[in-house]
Amino acid sequence: MINSTECNLLAPYFSLVCGRPAVLNRNVGGEDSAEGEWPWQVSLRKMGMHICGGALITNNWVVTAAHCFYVQLHNPSQYTVLLGANTLENSWAHRLSIGVADIIRNPWYAGEATSGDIALVRLAYPVRFTNYILPICVPAANVEFPPGKKCWVTGWGDIKDLPSPKRLQKLQVPIIDIQTCRRLYSIDMGPSLPQKNIQDDMICAGYAEGMKDTCKGDSGGPLMCKINQEWLLAGIVSWGEGCAEKNRPGVYTRLTSYQEATMVGNHNIISSYYLSCILCLFPLLSYITVFQNPLSFALGPF
Protein backbone atom coordinates (compact mmCIF):
# COMPACT_ATOMS: atom_id res chain seq x y z
CA MET A 1 0.00 0.00 0.00
CA ILE A 2 1.30 3.48 -0.83
CA ASN A 3 2.17 5.35 2.34
CA SER A 4 0.91 8.95 2.42
CA THR A 5 3.56 9.95 4.95
CA GLU A 6 6.24 8.66 2.60
CA CYS A 7 4.75 10.75 -0.21
CA ASN A 8 4.92 13.92 1.89
CA LEU A 9 8.51 13.30 2.93
CA LEU A 10 9.83 12.52 -0.53
CA ALA A 11 7.84 15.07 -2.55
CA PRO A 12 10.37 17.93 -2.20
CA TYR A 13 13.21 15.64 -3.31
CA PHE A 14 11.46 14.61 -6.49
CA SER A 15 10.42 18.17 -7.33
CA LEU A 16 14.10 19.16 -7.30
CA VAL A 17 15.35 16.54 -9.74
CA CYS A 18 12.57 16.50 -12.34
CA GLY A 19 12.52 18.16 -15.74
CA ARG A 20 16.20 19.12 -16.00
CA PRO A 21 18.13 16.99 -18.51
CA ALA A 22 21.91 17.08 -18.44
CA VAL A 23 21.98 17.37 -22.25
CA LEU A 24 20.85 20.71 -23.67
CA ASN A 25 18.32 20.71 -26.49
CA ARG A 26 19.55 21.06 -30.03
CA ASN A 27 18.31 23.30 -32.84
CA VAL A 28 14.63 23.49 -33.74
CA GLY A 29 15.14 22.07 -37.22
CA GLY A 30 16.54 18.71 -36.12
CA GLU A 31 14.43 15.57 -35.94
CA ASP A 32 16.82 13.07 -34.36
CA SER A 33 17.17 13.45 -30.60
CA ALA A 34 20.52 13.48 -28.84
CA GLU A 35 21.49 10.91 -26.23
CA GLY A 36 20.05 12.04 -22.88
CA GLU A 37 18.08 14.91 -24.39
CA TRP A 38 14.75 13.52 -23.15
CA PRO A 39 15.78 11.29 -20.22
CA TRP A 40 12.18 10.63 -19.11
CA GLN A 41 11.14 9.11 -22.44
CA VAL A 42 10.48 5.38 -22.17
CA SER A 43 9.49 2.61 -24.55
CA LEU A 44 6.64 0.42 -23.35
CA ARG A 45 7.18 -3.05 -24.75
CA LYS A 46 5.01 -6.14 -24.98
CA MET A 47 6.75 -9.46 -25.57
CA GLY A 48 9.86 -7.47 -26.48
CA MET A 49 8.15 -5.28 -29.12
CA HIS A 50 7.68 -1.51 -28.83
CA ILE A 51 3.98 -0.66 -28.57
CA CYS A 52 3.82 2.78 -26.93
CA GLY A 53 5.81 5.59 -25.45
CA GLY A 54 5.57 6.87 -21.91
CA ALA A 55 7.14 9.29 -19.46
CA LEU A 56 9.00 8.56 -16.25
CA ILE A 57 7.51 10.67 -13.43
CA THR A 58 9.21 9.15 -10.36
CA ASN A 59 11.83 6.52 -9.73
CA ASN A 60 9.23 3.75 -10.08
CA TRP A 61 6.22 5.15 -11.97
CA VAL A 62 5.59 5.78 -15.67
CA VAL A 63 2.57 7.57 -17.10
CA THR A 64 1.23 6.56 -20.51
CA ALA A 65 -2.06 6.24 -22.41
CA ALA A 66 -4.89 3.92 -21.37
CA HIS A 67 -5.44 2.85 -24.97
CA CYS A 68 -2.04 1.14 -24.91
CA PHE A 69 -3.65 -1.64 -22.85
CA TYR A 70 -6.62 -3.87 -23.51
CA VAL A 71 -9.39 -3.83 -20.94
CA GLN A 72 -9.06 -7.59 -20.49
CA LEU A 73 -5.36 -7.28 -19.72
CA HIS A 74 -4.39 -9.63 -16.91
CA ASN A 75 -0.69 -10.35 -17.31
CA PRO A 76 1.69 -7.41 -16.69
CA SER A 77 4.59 -9.87 -16.82
CA GLN A 78 4.29 -9.67 -20.63
CA TYR A 79 5.39 -6.04 -20.48
CA THR A 80 8.73 -4.33 -19.95
CA VAL A 81 9.80 -0.69 -19.87
CA LEU A 82 12.95 0.44 -21.66
CA LEU A 83 14.59 3.53 -20.14
CA GLY A 84 17.62 5.59 -21.13
CA ALA A 85 17.36 4.59 -24.79
CA ASN A 86 17.83 6.77 -27.85
CA THR A 87 17.50 3.91 -30.31
CA LEU A 88 15.47 0.75 -29.94
CA GLU A 89 17.94 -1.48 -31.76
CA ASN A 90 21.42 -0.98 -30.36
CA SER A 91 22.56 -1.92 -26.88
CA TRP A 92 23.95 1.03 -24.92
CA ALA A 93 25.54 0.88 -21.49
CA HIS A 94 23.08 3.41 -20.06
CA ARG A 95 19.94 1.61 -21.27
CA LEU A 96 17.84 -0.21 -18.73
CA SER A 97 15.01 -2.69 -19.28
CA ILE A 98 12.73 -3.24 -16.29
CA GLY A 99 9.76 -5.50 -15.76
CA VAL A 100 6.30 -4.21 -14.87
CA ALA A 101 4.81 -4.81 -11.43
CA ASP A 102 1.41 -3.18 -11.89
CA ILE A 103 -0.66 -1.42 -14.53
CA ILE A 104 -3.33 1.05 -13.47
CA ARG A 105 -5.69 1.88 -16.32
CA ASN A 106 -8.30 4.61 -15.96
CA PRO A 107 -11.62 2.70 -15.85
CA TRP A 108 -13.48 5.73 -17.20
CA TYR A 109 -11.70 5.52 -20.54
CA ALA A 110 -14.18 4.27 -23.16
CA GLY A 111 -12.17 4.28 -26.40
CA GLU A 112 -10.71 6.64 -29.00
CA ALA A 113 -11.67 10.31 -28.68
CA THR A 114 -13.17 9.83 -25.21
CA SER A 115 -12.01 11.29 -21.91
CA GLY A 116 -9.59 9.60 -19.56
CA ASP A 117 -6.91 8.22 -21.87
CA ILE A 118 -4.35 7.84 -19.11
CA ALA A 119 -2.67 4.95 -17.30
CA LEU A 120 0.10 4.39 -14.78
CA VAL A 121 2.75 1.69 -14.89
CA ARG A 122 4.61 0.71 -11.75
CA LEU A 123 8.11 -0.57 -12.41
CA ALA A 124 9.25 -3.82 -10.85
CA TYR A 125 11.82 -1.88 -8.81
CA PRO A 126 12.90 1.76 -8.41
CA VAL A 127 15.46 3.06 -10.89
CA ARG A 128 18.60 4.97 -10.06
CA PHE A 129 18.65 8.34 -11.80
CA THR A 130 21.46 9.04 -14.26
CA ASN A 131 22.11 11.61 -16.99
CA TYR A 132 20.05 9.35 -19.26
CA ILE A 133 17.25 8.37 -16.85
CA LEU A 134 15.45 11.22 -15.09
CA PRO A 135 11.79 12.05 -14.38
CA ILE A 136 9.84 14.87 -15.99
CA CYS A 137 7.96 17.39 -13.85
CA VAL A 138 4.18 17.08 -13.54
CA PRO A 139 2.35 20.44 -13.69
CA ALA A 140 0.09 21.64 -10.91
CA ALA A 141 -3.59 22.00 -11.77
CA ASN A 142 -3.35 25.79 -12.12
CA VAL A 143 -0.55 25.78 -14.69
CA GLU A 144 -1.65 26.96 -18.14
CA PHE A 145 -0.07 26.28 -21.51
CA PRO A 146 -1.18 29.24 -23.65
CA PRO A 147 -2.08 28.95 -27.34
CA GLY A 148 0.96 29.35 -29.54
CA LYS A 149 3.43 28.17 -26.93
CA LYS A 150 6.11 26.05 -28.55
CA CYS A 151 6.30 22.61 -26.96
CA TRP A 152 7.85 19.30 -27.96
CA VAL A 153 6.66 15.78 -28.56
CA THR A 154 8.92 12.74 -28.90
CA GLY A 155 8.59 9.13 -29.95
CA TRP A 156 9.69 6.21 -32.09
CA GLY A 157 6.43 6.15 -34.04
CA ASP A 158 6.00 5.95 -37.80
CA ILE A 159 7.07 8.83 -40.01
CA LYS A 160 4.36 9.44 -42.60
CA ASP A 161 4.77 7.03 -45.53
CA LEU A 162 8.16 5.91 -44.20
CA PRO A 163 9.36 3.09 -41.93
CA SER A 164 9.62 3.66 -38.20
CA PRO A 165 12.75 5.67 -37.31
CA LYS A 166 15.77 4.10 -35.68
CA ARG A 167 16.42 7.07 -33.41
CA LEU A 168 14.07 8.83 -31.03
CA GLN A 169 12.36 11.59 -32.99
CA LYS A 170 11.47 15.03 -31.66
CA LEU A 171 9.04 17.56 -33.06
CA GLN A 172 8.28 21.11 -31.97
CA VAL A 173 4.56 21.87 -32.01
CA PRO A 174 2.54 24.92 -30.94
CA ILE A 175 -0.32 24.60 -28.46
CA ILE A 176 -3.75 25.12 -30.07
CA ASP A 177 -6.61 26.48 -27.98
CA ILE A 178 -9.47 24.05 -27.48
CA GLN A 179 -12.07 26.09 -29.38
CA THR A 180 -9.85 26.31 -32.47
CA CYS A 181 -9.12 22.60 -32.20
CA ARG A 182 -12.82 21.79 -32.05
CA ARG A 183 -13.45 23.97 -35.09
CA LEU A 184 -10.67 22.28 -37.07
CA TYR A 185 -12.04 18.84 -36.28
CA SER A 186 -15.47 19.91 -37.51
CA ILE A 187 -14.13 20.78 -40.98
CA ASP A 188 -14.65 18.29 -43.81
CA MET A 189 -16.68 15.92 -41.69
CA GLY A 190 -18.61 13.81 -44.20
CA PRO A 191 -21.64 11.68 -43.33
CA SER A 192 -19.50 8.54 -43.22
CA LEU A 193 -17.16 9.98 -40.59
CA PRO A 194 -18.31 9.98 -36.97
CA GLN A 195 -18.03 13.27 -35.11
CA LYS A 196 -15.07 13.34 -32.72
CA ASN A 197 -15.37 15.84 -29.92
CA ILE A 198 -12.45 17.48 -28.17
CA GLN A 199 -13.12 16.96 -24.47
CA ASP A 200 -12.15 19.28 -21.63
CA ASP A 201 -9.43 16.92 -20.41
CA MET A 202 -7.67 17.11 -23.77
CA ILE A 203 -5.09 19.53 -25.14
CA CYS A 204 -4.27 20.04 -28.82
CA ALA A 205 -0.93 20.81 -30.43
CA GLY A 206 0.28 20.87 -34.01
CA TYR A 207 -0.35 22.63 -37.30
CA ALA A 208 -3.62 23.30 -39.11
CA GLU A 209 -1.86 22.69 -42.42
CA GLY A 210 -0.73 19.25 -41.26
CA MET A 211 2.62 17.86 -42.45
CA LYS A 212 4.01 17.48 -38.89
CA ASP A 213 2.41 15.32 -36.22
CA THR A 214 2.69 12.22 -34.07
CA CYS A 215 1.77 8.87 -35.58
CA LYS A 216 1.40 5.16 -34.84
CA GLY A 217 3.87 4.07 -32.18
CA ASP A 218 4.04 7.49 -30.51
CA SER A 219 0.95 6.82 -28.35
CA GLY A 220 1.42 7.38 -24.64
CA GLY A 221 4.49 9.53 -25.19
CA PRO A 222 5.04 12.97 -23.67
CA LEU A 223 3.99 16.42 -24.86
CA MET A 224 6.51 18.64 -23.05
CA CYS A 225 6.61 22.37 -22.42
CA LYS A 226 9.45 24.28 -20.79
CA ILE A 227 8.56 26.75 -18.04
CA ASN A 228 11.14 28.45 -15.80
CA GLN A 229 13.94 26.16 -16.96
CA GLU A 230 11.97 23.02 -16.13
CA TRP A 231 10.26 20.63 -18.52
CA LEU A 232 6.64 19.95 -17.63
CA LEU A 233 4.50 17.09 -18.87
CA ALA A 234 1.66 18.99 -20.55
CA GLY A 235 0.04 16.01 -22.22
CA ILE A 236 0.12 12.37 -23.28
CA VAL A 237 -0.15 11.37 -26.94
CA SER A 238 -3.75 10.18 -27.24
CA TRP A 239 -5.35 10.32 -30.69
CA GLY A 240 -5.74 12.08 -34.01
CA GLU A 241 -7.28 11.51 -37.41
CA GLY A 242 -4.64 10.00 -39.63
CA CYS A 243 -1.08 11.27 -39.31
CA ALA A 244 -0.19 14.88 -40.07
CA GLU A 245 -3.46 15.48 -41.93
CA LYS A 246 -4.73 18.98 -42.70
CA ASN A 247 -7.07 20.41 -40.03
CA ARG A 248 -6.35 17.45 -37.76
CA PRO A 249 -3.79 18.45 -35.09
CA GLY A 250 -2.62 16.00 -32.48
CA VAL A 251 -4.84 15.48 -29.44
CA TYR A 252 -3.30 14.76 -26.05
CA THR A 253 -4.57 13.91 -22.58
CA ARG A 254 -4.19 17.06 -20.50
CA LEU A 255 -2.22 16.28 -17.32
CA THR A 256 -3.52 19.27 -15.37
CA SER A 257 -7.01 17.75 -15.57
CA TYR A 258 -5.79 14.96 -13.29
CA GLN A 259 -4.16 17.03 -10.59
CA GLU A 260 -5.36 18.64 -7.42
CA ALA A 261 -4.75 22.36 -7.10
CA THR A 262 -1.72 21.84 -4.90
CA MET A 263 1.48 23.83 -5.02
CA VAL A 264 4.92 22.58 -3.96
CA GLY A 265 6.80 25.51 -2.44
CA ASN A 266 6.88 28.36 -4.94
CA HIS A 267 7.00 26.12 -7.99
CA ASN A 268 4.39 25.81 -10.71
CA ILE A 269 4.83 22.07 -10.53
CA ILE A 270 3.32 19.46 -8.33
CA SER A 271 5.89 16.97 -7.17
CA SER A 272 5.65 14.05 -9.54
CA TYR A 273 5.69 11.76 -6.53
CA TYR A 274 2.19 13.00 -5.68
CA LEU A 275 0.96 11.56 -8.95
CA SER A 276 2.23 8.19 -7.86
CA CYS A 277 0.00 8.46 -4.81
CA ILE A 278 -2.79 7.64 -7.27
CA LEU A 279 -5.54 9.31 -5.28
CA CYS A 280 -4.88 12.60 -7.08
CA LEU A 281 -5.01 10.97 -10.49
CA PHE A 282 -8.51 9.52 -10.61
CA PRO A 283 -10.51 11.60 -8.11
CA LEU A 284 -13.85 10.44 -6.71
CA LEU A 285 -13.20 6.81 -7.66
CA SER A 286 -13.74 4.19 -4.99
CA TYR A 287 -11.53 1.81 -6.93
CA ILE A 288 -9.34 1.82 -9.99
CA THR A 289 -8.56 -0.93 -12.42
CA VAL A 290 -5.35 -2.59 -11.28
CA PHE A 291 -3.69 -5.37 -13.24
CA GLN A 292 -1.05 -6.84 -10.98
CA ASN A 293 1.89 -9.04 -11.73
CA PRO A 294 1.44 -11.96 -9.31
CA LEU A 295 5.18 -11.95 -8.72
CA SER A 296 5.17 -8.34 -7.50
CA PHE A 297 4.34 -6.89 -4.12
CA ALA A 298 0.70 -6.25 -3.21
CA LEU A 299 -0.71 -2.80 -3.89
CA GLY A 300 -3.19 -2.97 -1.04
CA PRO A 301 -6.53 -1.17 -0.80
CA PHE A 302 -7.06 2.40 -1.94
Image (cartoon, rainbow, N blue to C red):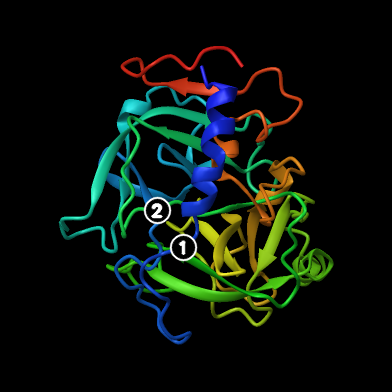
Q: Which residue is mark 1?
A: 20
Position of residue 254 measured from the top left corner of the image (x, y, whole percent): 68, 53
Where's residue 42, x and y in %? 38, 51
Q: Which x, y percent locates residue 48?
A: 25, 42
Placement of the C terminus among the 4 image quadrants = top right
Question: Which residue has dot 2 on it?
Answer: 134
Of 158 and 79, the residue lying toward us:
79
Residue at image coords 76%, 67%? 181
Q: Residue at x 40, y 83 (%)?
A: 30
Tell me if label 1 and label 2 are in contact, CB under 8 Å.
yes
Residue 49, position as x, y percentages in the image: 29, 46
Q: Is residue 301 above or below residue 18?
A: above
The image's mark for residue 208 is: none
Residue at 27% over, 67% down = 166
The secondary element bearing badge 1 is classed as: loop
Side (left or right) of 83 relative to 217: left
Is 2 situated above or below 168?
A: above
Disc 2 marks a residue whose amino acid type is: Leu
Labels 1 and 2: the sequence-earlier one: 1
Neighbours of disc 1 within 10 Å: few (<14), some (14-19), many (20+): many
- Seen from the viewer's position, the closer of residues 238 and 141 is 141
Residue 23 higher or lower than 65, as above or below: below
